[in-house]
Image (spheres, rainbow, N blue to C red):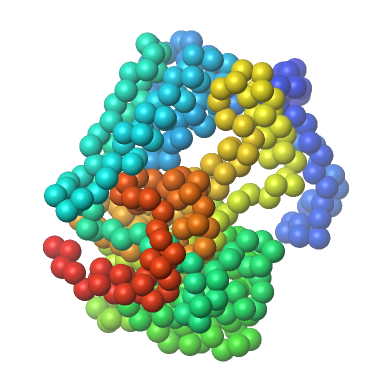
Amino acid sequence: ETFLEKLSGTSREGKIIIEWPSEDTSTTSSISPTFRFVQIHSASQLDNVVEEAHAVILAGGTLRPFSHVAAELFGDDVDVMRAAAEAEGQLSRNFDLLPTSASNKLRSPPSSMAQITPSLTTFTCGHVIPPNNVITSCLSTGPTSVKLDFRHSSRSSNQMVDELGRTIMNMCNVVPSGFVVFLPSYKYESHVFQRWRSTGMLSQIDRLKHIHREPKNSRDVEDALARYSNEASSSNKKGALLFSVMGGKMSEGINFANDMARCVLVAGLPFPDITDPVLKEKMESLDKEFRKRGTGINGQEYYQNLCMRTVNQSVGRAIRHSNDYAAIVLCDYRYSSEKRIWNALPQWLRRGSGAPRCEDASFGKVMKNVRSFFAQDKN
């Protein structure tokens, strides 16, 4: 009934796609092609709410860029789209790039609120933790000076997987308690473990911190977290190491407070599959709307925002209250070399600074900074 109802809508609101079973299909029930309706233009679903409500409040930690949210939910309102773009521009100039100096080092970033039009108010604020309770490090090279390049074409090579393993081993020596590593996909996580198991690196890492893995079944998540939490928070100095997947079961809505995540290492950038038919339809729709109206976001901007929103959700698992602290390690040369990626990180991670210099993203410099961070008194 719902499927037939969707057929009465316009092609702009959604599309019918045919999904063919593949070799990777995990369920034996998907042996025949299936028809699926995918929502392309989400704004139509919110129209009735906006019309009937006195006010609509959207609150969250990953709503920026506002132009992305406006294009998704208010794409039919050109005034709101332009107001969101203007608000984002003001924040980029007056909030994100706030300089950090010795005199204001411990001062939290100011709140910023802008009433752009009578129908749109935007509000952005800094994080609840003081600046010295988090350190953000971009890591471009590993312990043996191999360039950390986790693009799809190179990330599965033995050289890259082994260098990632050596990086994690070294980090285990300086990170106390819980250590969470986010990988770009389940397939890559499986490949990494297979390689490390064959070389003996997996057992070497496990001797430093007992390894835990994100379960494939959602029903097992709670038990897996309990086991990891017990080891990560135990009185012994060894702690525990948890491997998770960006965009997976443990990258959103999971509370890794206190000793559960004293360090989060993100390996690579989780760009979605560009060949996915749903994504292609969405990007083409945004490109068409952008050319027509000259405002909003285009398909390529949407594609990057999806990736960086997933990264930001993952690193946000570590800091859960005002007295919490953690080290964030972004493991891929692109975090420091591509300005658009660095600028897409939240302000509380960048602290108003520009992208790190090449020497600051070297393995030796990052290890020194992380070691010094944990040596400081956080109380």
Quadrant in the picture for residue 4: top right
Q: Which of the pair 207/214 is nearer the observer?
A: 207
Query: Which quadrant is the C terminus positioned in?
Result: bottom left
Tell me if residue 303 comes above or below residue 373 in the rendering.
above
- Residue name at image x 25 percent, y 68 percent: 373
Quadrant in the picture for residue 361: bottom left
Query: Residue 4: in sight, yes or no?
Result: yes
Residue 204 in the image, given as x and y percentages of width and height: 48, 87
Residue 324 in the image, given as x and y percentages of width and height: 24, 57
Residue 332 in the image, given as x and y percentages of width and height: 52, 63
Tell me if residue 127 comes above or below residue 282 in the rendering.
below
Left or right: 312 with respect to 25? left
Left or right: 137 with respect to 148? left
Residue 346 in the image, given as x and y percentages of width and height: 38, 45
Q: Which of the pair 359/2 is nearer the observer?
A: 359
- Residue name at image x 59 percent, y 37 percent: 302
